[in-house]
């Protein structure tokens, strides 16, 4: 090509490739559309992100990581002794203690169904607290923008803990 149009064409092609790879996060959008559940990421990854210790003896421990273009979503759930569930909620340092949420509203987001669990917002009597860890000076969780915790009492002094963070 004459008159230097070859470098201009190469620049335009490079820019188009850059825009294309940025808009899909470098992923094949047809193969991995957002959001999607990360394969192999479960309770250990969710607990590590949230800096939450799953109590020894907890049962039904489940977790997952949902990849999103802006921020990933981490979910974790387990059954433990009711007092331990409250201690976990308190450790998040919410400015308000857990409070009972009305179960008559549909959840904003449905993620726990991925774990085979009902959404905690739909459970009558579930207690909730939400916290922005950096806002309350929780340096352990400075990379976590928000954590929702739900505590749902079960029979026999047990409780299911639901944690949802991004």
Image (cartoon, helix red, strand yellow):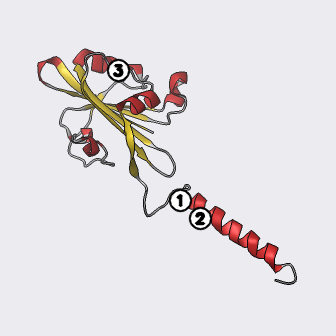
Q: Secondary structure at mark 1?
A: loop
Label 3 Cα neighbours within 10 Å, binned few <14 / some 14-19 / many ≥20: some
In this rendering, the answer to whether 117 lies above or below 139 is below
Front: mark 3 or 2 = 2
In this rendering, the answer to whether 155 lies above or below 108 is above
User: Between residues 73 and 61, which one lies in front from this camera angle?
Assistant: 61
> According to the image, label 3 marks what residue?
88
Residue in view at x 33 percent, y 48 percent: 109
Do the residues bearing badges 1 and 2 touch, measured as CB atoms within 8 Å? Answer: yes
In this rendering, the answer to whether 126 lies above or below 89 is below
Residue in view at x 23 percent, y 39 percent: 102
Q: Secondary structure at mark 2?
A: helix
User: Between residues 137 and 27, which one lies in front from this camera angle?
Assistant: 27
Where residue 149 sits: x, y (%)?
Answer: 34, 31
Where residue 56 sits: x, y (%)?
Answer: 30, 15
> According to the image, label 1 marks what residue?
24
Which mark, residue 20? 2
Q: CA distance from mark 3 to mark 1?
A: 37 Å
Quadrant containing the C terminus is top left
């Amino acid at each position: 090509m004459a008159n230097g149009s070859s470098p201009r064409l190469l620049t335009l092609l490079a820019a188009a490739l850059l825009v294309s790879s940025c808009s899909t996060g470098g992923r094949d959008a047809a193969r991995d559309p957002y959001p999607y559940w990360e394969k192999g990421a479960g309770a250990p990854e969710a607990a590590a992100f949230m800096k939450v210790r799953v109590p020894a003896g907890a049962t039904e421990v489940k977790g997952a990581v949902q990849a999103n273009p802006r921020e990933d979503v981490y979910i974790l759930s387990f059954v433990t002794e009711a007092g331990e569930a409250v201690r976990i909620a308190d450790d998040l340092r919410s400015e308000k203690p857990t409070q009972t949420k009305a179960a008559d509203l549909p959840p904003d987001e449905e993620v726990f169904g991925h774990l085979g669990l009902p959404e905690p917002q739909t459970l009558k009597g579930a207690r909730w607290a939400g916290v922005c860890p950096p806002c309350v000076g929780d340096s352990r969780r400075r990379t976590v923008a928000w954590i929702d915790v739900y505590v749902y009492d079960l029979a026999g002094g047990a409780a299911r803990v639901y944690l949802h963070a991004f």
